[in-house]
Amino acid sequence: VTVRARVDGEVIEQDIQEGQAVARGDLLFRIDDREIQAALAKDEAMLARDQATLARAQADAARARDLLSRKVAAQQQVDQAEADAKIAAANVLGDQAAIESDHIRLGYTQVRAPIDGRVGAVRVTPGNIVRSSDGGDGLLTITQMKPLRVTFTLPERDLPALRAATGDNGKVPVTVTLHDGAAGQESGELSFIDSSVDSSSGTITAKALLPNEDGSLWPGQYVDVEVELGRVANAVTIPLVAVQPGQDGPFVYLIGADDKVAVRQVTVGETMGDAVVVRDGLQAGDRVVTEGQQRLRDGSRVAERRPAAPKPAGASS
């Protein structure tokens, strides 16, 4: 939120420092209110005068009606007296509205935080003249720190899965990690899906709301976002590089007990990073080839390469 002055005047007090955390309603600045106080006193005096005028006009109207009932006064005199009483009553209402306006303007001389957040650069100090018509960057900016909203885009092909996930219970879990690899995660929920796909990029914009209670995230940061579009119970997963394209569909080289490979057609599902879900064709515990598939054919013998064991501390090569 960009905080701006809503009345003209001199800043006489600054109650905030740059970078300070504030709560909604905290006092930020005080603007000289003497001119508004004088206008308020004038309007209160006018109200007192017009209230006295109203009392007199109402009494005159009552007497005129009494005289008319005794056929001493004319109807025109009663009409005039009642019109004067209504005019006086309208003047009182106008004075009350002017006083209410003065109180509102007087409240604007105390500039308070409209939201919870952190103060950015303070752009005015005591002694400066501010005006309600001033544009630009205002007095200061307050940035909400919690909750935060993360904006990201998803490929158009993920839209059906995204809509299906929101249709189940309306809550789609979202996990955010810092883009630079720093430790820490923040979990939230999907809060918005754009109403149309960006035809130029083939993506759709989405947003998620994050509590950010520990303040680990900062407005404007780049983050990595993971959206949980569903869960597959007891899923069989293999490295994505093990899947090969074929005329009959994707396949893998399955390693048998005799270390010979066999071509196995598979049905793949969702991918997550370097792993892919195999919906059909493999069972848990099956071994597949992940390197050198171009040199293999059905029945080829392979040798498993195990990761090198870590060297003990102090060992040299």
Image: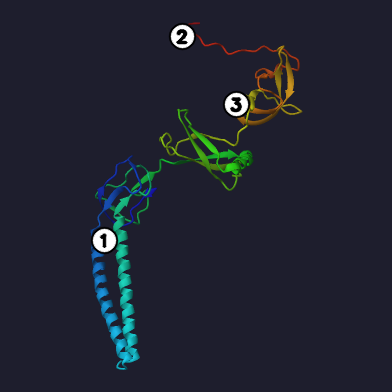
Q: CA distance from mark 3 to mark 2?
A: 31 Å
User: In the rendered structure, which amino acid carries the disc numbered 1?
Assistant: Ile
Q: Which residue is mark 2?
A: 313
**Image vertical order of residue 29 relative to residue 235, above or below:** below
Circle 3: is it few (<14), some (14-19), or many (20+) Cα within 10 Å? few
On screen, 54 above or below 221? Answer: below
Q: Residues within 10 Å of mark 2 (few under 14, many from 20)?
A: few
Of the image marks 1 and 2, the number of the one nearer the N terminus? 1
Residue at (30%, 70%) from the top-left corner?
Answer: 95
Label 3 – label 1 distance at C-alpha: 68 Å
Residue 154 quadrant: top right
Q: Element under label 1?
A: helix
Q: Residue 12: give x, y in percent of width and height.
A: 24, 51
* Residue displayed at 26% across by 67% down: 43
Q: Residue 74: give x, y in percent of width and height.
A: 33, 92
Kind of residue at badge 3: Asp
Closest to the observer, 187 or 313? 187
Compute the Cα span from label 1 to label 2.
Answer: 78 Å
Give the residue number, with chain letter if any, for mark 3. 274
Where is residue 6 shown, x and y percent of the image? 33, 56
